[in-house]
Image (tube, grey):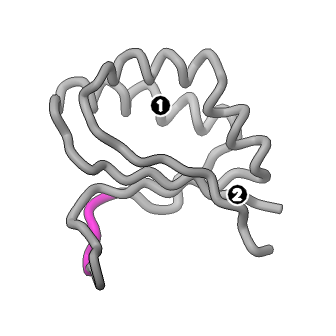
C-alpha cells in the first residue's frame, strides 16, 4: 500500500537553511523511492487552512517512507535545516 509524506511549513525562520535543506532532501528522498507529487503554497485554503508551504511525497509503503526519513542522507538534510523552519511532518497510508 502506498504512503504519503506530508509536510507543512508553519513558519520559515531562515530561508538560507531551508534552501540548503531542500538541496539535500530532494535527492535523498527521491533516491529512497519518493516521488514528489505536490509542493508549494496552496492555491486555496478552507476552514482553518493556513497559507503555508506544503510538500507531499509518495512512497511505495509506510515502511519505505520511514526508512527514507531515518536514512543517513536525510539526516544530513535535517542537519542543514538546523532550526530554519517550524514544520509539521507526517506519513499517511494511501487508500490503494
Please, which residue is most extreme toward the bottom here? Answer: 46
> Where residue 27 appears, x then y in whole percent?
52, 31
List the residue tagged with mark 2. 3
Q: Is residue 89 left or right of residue 80?
A: right
Q: Residues within 10 Å of mark 1 (few under 14, many from 20)?
A: many
List the residue tagged with mark 1. 25
Q: Nearer the viewer, mark 2 or mark 1?
A: 2
Q: Residues within 10 Å of mark 2 (few under 14, many from 20)?
A: many
- Front one among 26 and 85: 85
Q: Is residue 73 left or right of residue 86?
A: right
Q: Is residue 1 magenta?
A: no
* SS category of the residue bearing label 2: strand
Is residue 75 placed above or below 67 in the rendered structure? above
> Where residue 71 appears, x then y in whole percent?
65, 22
Q: Are marks 2 and 1 in contact (CB under 8 Å)?
A: no
> Where residue 65 appears, x then y in whole percent?
68, 43
Say whether disc 2 or disc 1 marks the residue closer to the N-terminus. 2
> Where residue 37 appears, x then y in whole percent?
52, 61
Distance between the alpha carbons at the discs numbered 2 and 1: 18 Å
Q: How many marks?
A: 2
> What residue is drawn where x is 19% and y is 40%?
12
Disc number for residue 64: none
- Front one among 25 and 12: 12
- Front one among 72 and 92: 92
Is residue 71 placed above or below 65 in the rendered structure? above
What's the magenta region?
40-44
Task: Label the magenta part by its dominant secondary structure.
Answer: loop
Amino acid at each position: 500500500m502506498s504512503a504519503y509524506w506530508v509536510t507543512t511549513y508553519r513558519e520559515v525562520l531562515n530561508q538560507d537553511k531551508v534552501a540548503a535543506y531542500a538541496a539535500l532532501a530532494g535527492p535523498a528522498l527521491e533516491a529512497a523511492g519518493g516521488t514528489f507529487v505536490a509542493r508549494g503554497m496552496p492555491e486555496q485554503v478552507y476552514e482553518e487552512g493556513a497559507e503555508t508551504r506544503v510538500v507531499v511525497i509518495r512512497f511505495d509503503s509506510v515502511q519505505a517512507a520511514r526508512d527514507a526519513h531515518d536514512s543517513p542522507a536525510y539526516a544530513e538534510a535535517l542537519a542543514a535545516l538546523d532550526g530554519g523552519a517550524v514544520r509539521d511532518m507526517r506519513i499517511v497510508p494511501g487508500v490503494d
